[in-house]
């Protein structure tokens, strides 16, 4: 039977059946032996570089038929240390570079490197072994080697337009790890109500291929829980007998992939007992299928639900836990109330406990013991704490609602009694007075309820309103005030508008008629009490003023005169740009006016009563000539003539002494010209600055501390001294070039200025080989001594290359010793032993140093914790019985 890979090859062959040459190629292509990985990309005769990223499921360095591709990983193509293209692996893990996604196109007979950044490695995976089969079948192995923090495959394209499609990156992952959690939809229910539990089984292993198979869940219900239903349907059985019979539910969930894939089960049960009801679930997997779990401590989960216990006066309850637990401490809320394996509860509250189990392992309650008092009806008086104005009445209504409120007696503090669950009284207090009421319920199991309210009696405000005198055409502002402190709102009479919402001040509209006019305001306190005040506005007439106009030449001044027809004493305020000829004068002059055109000025005349009016006039300014200079070029190379031409008049005088309209200059500097109008005699001056540029002087610097790098390290080459265009020997442009060479490389550049001036320079980037390894590190977890883990975990490398020393630190960022403090490598191998057992999966960064420490490679590995676990249950059951 043909596999998927062979099927796709066969389909490829039939597409070219009309050509014998293509048919023969396709038949050969389809004849790959079984076991070849799927997804081999690229046509036989198309210049390209590719193939795929895959997960090496059994870590043997070989692409097996079942090894899946890895999608969405960035892949980069470099030439001579310069980035030429990037792509992302497809759903089947394949990638490909061709002329369509490579800068300047893919070139024949050219050396390239295909790279994957270590930071882009699939989560929880490392690079698998390289060229395991010695290139005997290059299509089925992993070709990448670790260079610094890069996975690199070196490729040289064909000189005859052939594809290179055997360039594979293999990664290996870890083991499956099942985790079970169980939660209830509520923390507390009433007796006889239903509660739902959700059981979720999750494979928390890092990779989707870390599959757990034969997954089975068992759920044991508390004696106080009666099974109702589940989804999916469970297989139901029982354990125990008589009153101790418990229901056991079983589900077979099959297979669960890693990378947090999960399966969910829901259970509904009825709470038929008071206290704390427990529900325990376990998960197991077939240990002979897939990879074994490395962590079984998370394979059990217990959930609980609280059914509140009702407590009446004189009653009590004893809560107890098994004698096998010691160091028992009881708490009411967060306050310790007792010690010992039992405790008598005599007051309402939420109770919990902590204890020590077998081997000293900790244990505690999962749900609190909730004890509640008998119910009390809800009693309220409406309105609540009302406020009234002096001399008015208030109506108060008391109402009982909720459990126990359907029948009873209302008794007010003034002696009024009504046999009902609601009662209304009307009172007119002369001062602030408190009223209370008690409702005595006639229903069984309920208690009396009392409440009170205070009626506040507020005084009426005393308000005043100011009067005002204004000039015709202006507005008046009147201010209201209340002697007593407090917050008030003001309602002004028609013709007055508040200066702002809620303001105590209000303005009139512009009043043009002379005379006296009345207004009023009503002030209302925050309590709604109010009173009214009145005031008046007197309006005086405005003077009538005139101002003369004038015409002048640019660069001179004008004098304008103001006058008022009516007799009287006036002061004059001139607009900006006019200066009185003397203090209090009706005449004013402008400054020197240079801008041509007509400008408007104004004067305001003010009477002895403070009333005013304004007049306007204009000054017309004739223009002066406008001088301009046009340069043939503002910037030129040395030895180039620049032609300067002036316009705007018919006479010219240059700063060089020349009097023609055009002059020629060859030296940097600022040149000015004065242009005149022979008819008007007006002149103006302007200037221009020209620059003569020298040939550029270039220098190249690197962003790295020196021009010598470790393989796989990037540096930015930056040229200075060039203000024009830069073209590098790689064909790239710009002042900076990011390079990441794997061998020593020389880069040159040419700078061409906008003037045509140019210069050329070069820089050599030396590259030292970085440490590497053939096989991934072996990470061994700590051994156990009972419930205690030994601190004897190990990290080992056996096939190091170009590595003189090594050291490690915790975390994904290296913080360990430098080269001098690192451990020497012997026979290309090293082992770090005696590592502490971590609480959770711990990352370590191992730094591999080359000779002398000039280059290093950081390798991140993960140490799983040894699971040495106390057998104590996570939740301790509790028994509650009534004592009196």
Image (spheres, rainbow, N blue to C red):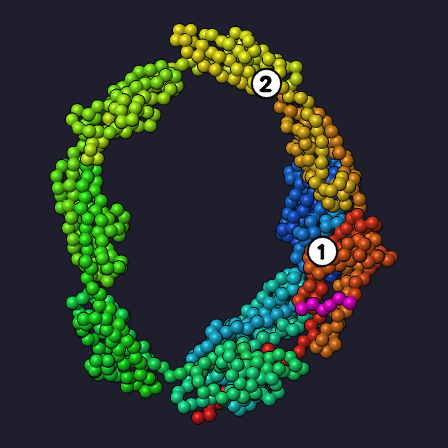
Numbered disc 1: secondary structure: loop
Instruction: State the image quarter where residue 371 is shown.
Output: bottom left
The foreground one among 526 and 561 is: 561
The mark that comes first in sequence, 1 or 2, is: 2
**Residue tagged by mark 2?**
669
729 over 302 or under it: above or below: above
Residue drawn at point x = 23 percent, y = 59 percent: 484
Instruction: Check if residue 434 falls in the magenta segment.
Output: no
Instruction: Check if residue 837 falls in the magenta segment.
Output: yes
Q: Nearer the viewer, mark 1 or mark 2?
A: 2
Residue 814 image label: 1
Q: Where is residue 97 in the image (x, y as percent from the top left)?
A: 68, 42
Crowding at dot 1, Cα within 10 Å, few <14 / some 14-19 / many 20+, comes out as some
Q: Where is residue 715 in the image (x, y as percent from the top left)?
A: 71, 41
The secondary structure making up most of the magenta span is: loop
Instruction: State the image quarter where residue 611 is shown.
Output: top left
Residue 881 image label: none
Of all residues shown, which one is farthest toward the bottom? 884
Q: From which residue to which does the magenta span run?
A: 834-839
Residue drawn at point x = 22 percent, y = 49 percent: 479
Tell me: 592 left or right of 74. Answer: left
């Amino acid at each position: 039977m043909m596999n998927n890979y062979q099927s796709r090859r066969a389909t490829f062959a039939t597409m070219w059946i009309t050509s014998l040459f293509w048919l023969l190629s396709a038949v050969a292509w389809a004849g790959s032996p079984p076991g070849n990985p799927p997804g081999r990309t690229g046509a036989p005769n198309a210049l390209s570089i590719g193939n795929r990223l895959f997960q090496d499921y059994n870590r043997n360095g070989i692409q097996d038929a079942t090894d899946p591709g890895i999608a969405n990983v960035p892949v980069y193509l470099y030439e001579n240390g310069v980035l030429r293209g990037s792509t992302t692996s497809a759903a089947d893990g394949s990638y490909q570079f061709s002329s369509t996604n490579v800068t300047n196109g893919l070139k024949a007979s050219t050396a390239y490197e295909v790279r994957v950044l270590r930071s882009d490695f699939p989560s929880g995976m490392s690079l698998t072994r390289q060229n395991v089969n010695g290139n005997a079948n290059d299509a089925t192995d992993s070709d990448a080697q670790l260079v610094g923090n890069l996975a690199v495959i070196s490729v040289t394209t064909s000189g005859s337009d052939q594809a290179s499609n055997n360039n594979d990156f293999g990664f290996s992952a870890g083991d499956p790890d099942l985790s079970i959690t169980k939660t209830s939809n509520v923390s507390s229910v009433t007796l006889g109500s239903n509660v739902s539990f959700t059981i979720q089984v999750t494979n928390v292993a890092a990779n989707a291929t870390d599959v757990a198979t034969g997954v089975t869940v068992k759920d044991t219900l508390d004696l106080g829980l009666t099974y109702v239903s589940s989804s999916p349907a469970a297989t139901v059985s029982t354990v125990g007998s008589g009153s101790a019979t418990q229901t056991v539910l079983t589900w077979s969930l099959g297979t669960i992939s890693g990378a947090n894939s999960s399966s969910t089960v829901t259970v509904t049960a009825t709470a038929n007992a008071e206290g704390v009801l427990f529900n325990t679930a376990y998960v197991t997997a077939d240990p002979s299928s897939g990879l074994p779990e490395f962590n079984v401590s998370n394979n059990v989960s217990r959930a609980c639900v609280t059914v509140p216990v009702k407590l009446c006066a004189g009653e009590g309850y004893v809560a107890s836990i098994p004698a096998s637990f010691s160091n028992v401490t009881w708490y009411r809320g967060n306050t310790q109330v007792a010690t010992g394996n039992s405790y008598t509860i005599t007051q309402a509250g939420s109770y919990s406990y902590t204890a020590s189990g077998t081997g000293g392992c900790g244990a505690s309650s999962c749900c609190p013991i909730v004890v509640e008092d008998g119910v009390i009806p809800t009693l309220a008086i409406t309105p609540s704490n009302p406020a009234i104005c002096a001399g008015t009445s208030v109506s108060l209504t008391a109402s009982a609602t909720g459990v126990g409120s359907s029948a009873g007696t209302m008794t007010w503090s003034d002696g009024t009694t009504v046999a009902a669950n609601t009662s209304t009284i009307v009172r007119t207090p002369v001062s602030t007075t408190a009223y209370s009421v008690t409702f005595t319920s006639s229903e069984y199991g309920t208690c009396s309820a009392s409440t009170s309210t205070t009626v506040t009696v507020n005084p009426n405000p005393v308000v005043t309103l100011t009067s005002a005198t204004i000039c015709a055409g202006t507005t008046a502002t009147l201010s209201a005030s209340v002697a007593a402190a407090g917050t008030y709102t003001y309602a002004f009479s028609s013709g007055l508008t508040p200066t702002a919402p809620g303001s105590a001040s209000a303005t009139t509209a512009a009043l043009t008629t002379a005379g006296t006019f009345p207004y009023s305001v009503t002030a209302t306190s925050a309590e709604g009490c109010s009173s009214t005040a009145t005031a008046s506005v007197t309006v005086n007439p405005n003077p009538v003023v005139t101002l003369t106009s004038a015409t002048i030449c640019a660069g001179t001044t004008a004098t304008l005169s103001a006058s008022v027809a009516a007799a009287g004493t006036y002061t004059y305020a001139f607009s900006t740009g006019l200066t009185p000829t003397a203090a209090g004068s009706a005449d004013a002059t402008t400054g020197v006016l240079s801008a041509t055109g007509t400008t408007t000025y104004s004067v305001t005349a003010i009477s002895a009563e403070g009333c005013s009016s304004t007049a306007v006039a204009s000054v017309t300014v004739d223009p002066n000539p406008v001088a301009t200079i046009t340069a043939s070029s503002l910037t030129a190379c040395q030895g180039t003539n620049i032609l300067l031409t002036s316009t705007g008049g018919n006479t010219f005088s240059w700063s060089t002494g020349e009097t023609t309209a055009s002059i020629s200059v060859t030296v940097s500097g600022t040149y000015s010209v004065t242009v005149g109008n022979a008819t008007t005699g007006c002149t103006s001056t302007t200037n221009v600055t020209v620059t003569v540029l020298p040939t550029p002087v270039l220098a190249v610097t690197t962003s790295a501390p020196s021009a010598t790098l470790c393989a796989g390290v990037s540096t930015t080459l930056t040229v200075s001294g060039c203000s024009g265009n830069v073209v590098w020997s790689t064909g790239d442009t710009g002042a900076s070039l990011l390079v990441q060479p794997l061998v020593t490389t020389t880069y040159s550049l040419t700078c061409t200025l906008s003037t045509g001036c140019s210069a050329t320079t070069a820089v050599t980037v030396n590259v030292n080989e970085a440490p590497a390894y053939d096989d991934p590190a072996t990470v061994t977890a700590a051994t156990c001594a009972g419930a205690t883990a030994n601190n004897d975990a190990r990290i080992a490398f056996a096939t190091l290359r170009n590595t003189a020393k090594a050291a490690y630190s915790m975390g994904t960022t290296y913080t360990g010793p430098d080269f001098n403090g690192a451990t020497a490598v012997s026979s290309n191998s090293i082992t770090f032993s005696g590592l502490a057992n971590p609480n959770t999966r711990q990352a370590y960064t191992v730094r591999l140093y080359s000779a002398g420490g000039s280059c290093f490679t950081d390798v991140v590995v993960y140490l799983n914790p040894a699971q040495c676990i106390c057998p104590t249950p996570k939740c301790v059951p509790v028994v509650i019985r009534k004592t009196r």
